[in-house]
Image: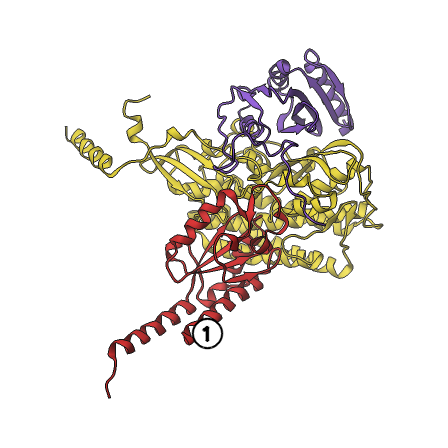
């Protein structure tokens, strides 16, 4: 350690209320001039205690609670939960219900990725792209609302199936919407790969090699942008992904630009799957009856959320309430990469780097915070700063 | 090669890797294998999977086996493709301590801190044992995911 | 007949202030434990389809510049202090809009051990927008209703 290591350290606190992201998180960046040398994150501002709360609610009540773990990826949480509970109860869900679930999952992925594209562009100061992508996102919001009756918490799932159906008219609307979005997505791909001002903010920034991504356990598009072949939809198909498969989208560059490209290209996969489902939607029932109580058992449910692998562990105890539900969200895996990614970059790049992993605090904060020991930080009094200034310039003059 | 074969081959190779540590082996569902371990065997077992490149650590679950039971259980879930191996370690509540696996898998740090805060399990040697995901004013010695911590039921 | 010049000036100044405040309120948004649902809908009100900015509304990063605090979510133990601090940093007069079921009553998070309650248990609230989450139209309506009531209040005052 250098002799004046402490004296050179300057910590910039940001948050929890801050203009960059719409969710509370507290960041401390250690900087040397404009260059970030370290980062710590303090979360927990939206920790509510959902895992404990599930133990005092019934299986059915929990469906609506867990849907509200996160407002952006609500359907995938409900789906992971339903798949687990149905396995515990030994139900076999009709194929039509599984296909409709997959349809909503992919529509949700479109809304989530477009939302992210806008927010990430906003962090780069590129508000034009933010406004365009959010304007076009309203198309998929309209589709979701027409299908389920709500724009955000769709409640399409019930235990044992779905409560919505897709008729011919809705099919037409969805296909029209998807055609429009596909056209726009080609434009976005063009923008994020060729707009010279934007590419300067993303190409070669926050590069993560495949080895580093695996070391820190990155998941989802963040990992796939570093060349990690991991997608639960392909590795361990659930819902109707056997019949309506997606192809993995990979990039090997591992920088911010790659994360943009991977997410935008995943949109094309979603469009293709939605068309395939609507083309060959299986006929049949929408739901089967679910028992109130579930005998003692345990299971694991893994799904691919828009941000990466979502993991549910469920344990039943013979009553109408769960014994334990453990939720491991994708954001917590990706947060681990931030301190490694931030080091060596300009402070001004931090919002972009953070947005690049598509963090979701409400998912995350049910459980964990990251913090460095308190003695690592330091408060400078005015007198100390003055003395430091004097001695610094004296040194320089010599 | 179809998926079923791949899964059973993965599980078989995990079974061989873990054989020296295994106390009890269960296959609760297709594609899953649960292996009970002694606390002392945890690190060798994790090393056997990790150093041989078998899958990756996906999550660590803490369990309270009940108010009247004296034990907590920690579950380490490893996944390779669709195959899931769960390492199960039981620790007594009175002396709840497990060794850290961060030396092998740094990403486990979050999960270990969660065990400490939510279940009161001491993770020996974990790089950052700070109790800080709960609010700053959370009372010491109260572990919300233990079964003796009761939250009020909601009506309905 | 004598004219109280000072009073006339003060009245005129008040009128200008009311006019400015109701025609260009600046907003700050704070999430004290929300699931994001309301947050993304608030963001959606700013985007071309809904365009809240046509009412002169601007979403602002600093509490020191803001007239209206938009709150989402139940209040968690950890966020309570921060919510209070943000509220205290805002200049007078200041108004609070609680957006969403959780901000109004705690919603589905009632009874969670880290949730201490809803917004008006911590700071005074002037307008409530119900829904889980409320539609962007409802959020706009809530903000506009608040502005209308301010106008009326200040005219009678």
Which chain is indicated by disc 1? C
In the displayed structure, A94 sits above or below B5; it is below
How many residues crowd around disc 1 within 10 Å: few (fewer than 14), some, or many (20 or more)? few
In the displayed structure, A116 sits above or below A298; it is below
Quarter of the view holding residue A200: top left
Asked whether residue C62 appears in the rendered view, the answer is: no
Q: Which chain is yellow?
A: A
Label 1, on which residue? C152
The colour applied to the residues of chain B in this rendering is purple
Q: Secondary structure at mark 1?
A: helix
Figure label count: 1
Q: Position of residue A263 (x, y in %)?
A: 57, 43
User: Dividing the image into 4 quarters, which one contains the C terminus of chain C?
Assistant: bottom left
Quarter of the view holding residue A320: top right
Q: Position of residue B38 (x, y in %)?
A: 66, 15
Q: Position of residue A63 (x, y in %)?
A: 70, 45
Left or right: where does residue A340 sit relative to residue A94? Answer: left
User: Dividing the image into 4 quarters, which one contains the N terminus of chain C?
Assistant: bottom left
């Amino acid at each position: 350690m250098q002799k004046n290591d402490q004296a050179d350290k300057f910590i910039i606190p940001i948050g929890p209320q801050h203009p960059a992201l719409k969710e509370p998180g507290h960041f401390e960046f250690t900087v040397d001039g404009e260059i970030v040398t370290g980062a710590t994150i303090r979360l927990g501002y939206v920790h509510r205690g959902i895992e404990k709360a599930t133990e005092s609610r019934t299986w059915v009540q929990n469906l609506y609670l867990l849907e509200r773990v996160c407002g952006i990826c609500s359907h995938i949480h409900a789906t992971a939960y339903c798949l687990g509970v149905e396995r515990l109860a030994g139900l076999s869900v009709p194929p039509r219900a599984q296909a409709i679930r997959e349809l909503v999952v992919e529509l949700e992925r479109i809304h989530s990725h477009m939302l992210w594209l806008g927010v990430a562009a906003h962090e780069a100061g590129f508000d034009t792209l933010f406004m365009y992508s959010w304007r076009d996102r309203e198309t998929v919001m309209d589709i979701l609302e027409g299908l389920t009756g709500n724009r955000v918490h769709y409640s399409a799932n019930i235990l044992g199936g779905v409560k919505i159906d897709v008729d011919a008219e809705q099919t037409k609307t969805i296909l029209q919407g998807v055609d429009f979005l596909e056209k726009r997505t080609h434009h976005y791909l063009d923008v994020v790969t060729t707009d010279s001002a934007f590419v300067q903010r993303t190409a070669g920034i926050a590069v993560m090699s495949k080895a580093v991504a695996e070391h820190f356990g990155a998941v989802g598009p963040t990992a796939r942008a570093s060349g990690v072949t991991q997608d639960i939809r392909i590795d361990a198909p659930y819902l109707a992904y056997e019949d309506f498969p997606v192809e993995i989208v990979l990039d090997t560059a591992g920088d911010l630009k790659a994360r943009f490209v991977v997410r935008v290209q995943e949109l094309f996969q979603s469009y293709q799957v939605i068309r395939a489902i609507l083309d060959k939607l299986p006929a049949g029932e929408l739901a089967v009856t679910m028992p109130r109580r579930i005998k003692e058992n345990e299971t694991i449910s893994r799904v691919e959320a828009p941000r990466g692998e979502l993991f549910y562990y469920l344990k039943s105890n013979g009553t109408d309430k769960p014994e334990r539900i453990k939720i491991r969200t994708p954001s917590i895996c990706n947060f681990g990469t931030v301190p490694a990614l931030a080091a060596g970059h300009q402070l001004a790049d931090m919002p972009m780097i953070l947005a690049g992993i598509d963090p979701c605090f409400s998912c995350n904060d049910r459980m964990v915070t990251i913090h460095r020991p308190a003695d690592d930080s330091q408060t400078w009094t005015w007198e100390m700063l003055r003395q430091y200034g004097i001695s610094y310039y004296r040194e320089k003059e010599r | 090669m179809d998926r079923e074969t791949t899964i059973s081959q993965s599980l078989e190779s995990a079974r061989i890797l873990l054989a020296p540590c295994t106390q009890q082996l269960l296959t609760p569902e297709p594609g899953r294998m649960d292996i009970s371990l002694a606390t002392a065997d945890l690190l060798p077992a994790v090393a056997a999977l990790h150093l041989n490149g078998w899958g990756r650590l996906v999550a660590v679950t803490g369990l309270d086996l009940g108010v009247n039971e004296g034990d907590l259980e920690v579950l380490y879930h490893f996944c390779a493709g669709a195959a899931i191996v769960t390492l199960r370690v039981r620790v007594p509540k009175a002396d709840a301590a497990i060794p850290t696996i961060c030396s092998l898998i740094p990403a486990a740090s979050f999960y270990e801190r969660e065990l400490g805060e939510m279940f009161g399990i001491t993770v020996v040697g974990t790089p950052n044992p700070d109790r800080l995901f709960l609010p700053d004013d959370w009372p010491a010695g109260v572990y919300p995911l233990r079964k003796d911590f009761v939250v009020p039921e909601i009506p309905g | 007949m004598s004219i109280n010049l000072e009073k006339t000036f003060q009245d005129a100044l008040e009128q200008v202030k009311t006019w400015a405040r109701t025609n260009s309120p600046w907003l700050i948004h704070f999430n004290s434990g929300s699931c994001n649902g309301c947050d993304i809908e608030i963001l959606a009100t700013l985007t071309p389809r809904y365009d809240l900015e046509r009412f002169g509304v601007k979403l602002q990063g600093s509490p020191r510049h803001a007239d209206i605090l938009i709150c989402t979510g139940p209040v968690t133990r950890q966020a309570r202090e921060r919510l209070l601090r943000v509220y205290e940093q805002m200049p007078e007069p200041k108004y609070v809009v609680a957006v969403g079921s959780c901000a109004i009553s705690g919603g589905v998070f009632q009874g969670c051990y880290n949730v201490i309650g809803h917004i008006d248990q911590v700071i005074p609230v002037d307008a409530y927008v119900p829904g889980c989450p409320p539609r962007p139209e409802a959020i706009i309506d809530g903000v506009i209703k608040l502005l209308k009531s301010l106008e009326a209040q200040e005219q009678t005052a």
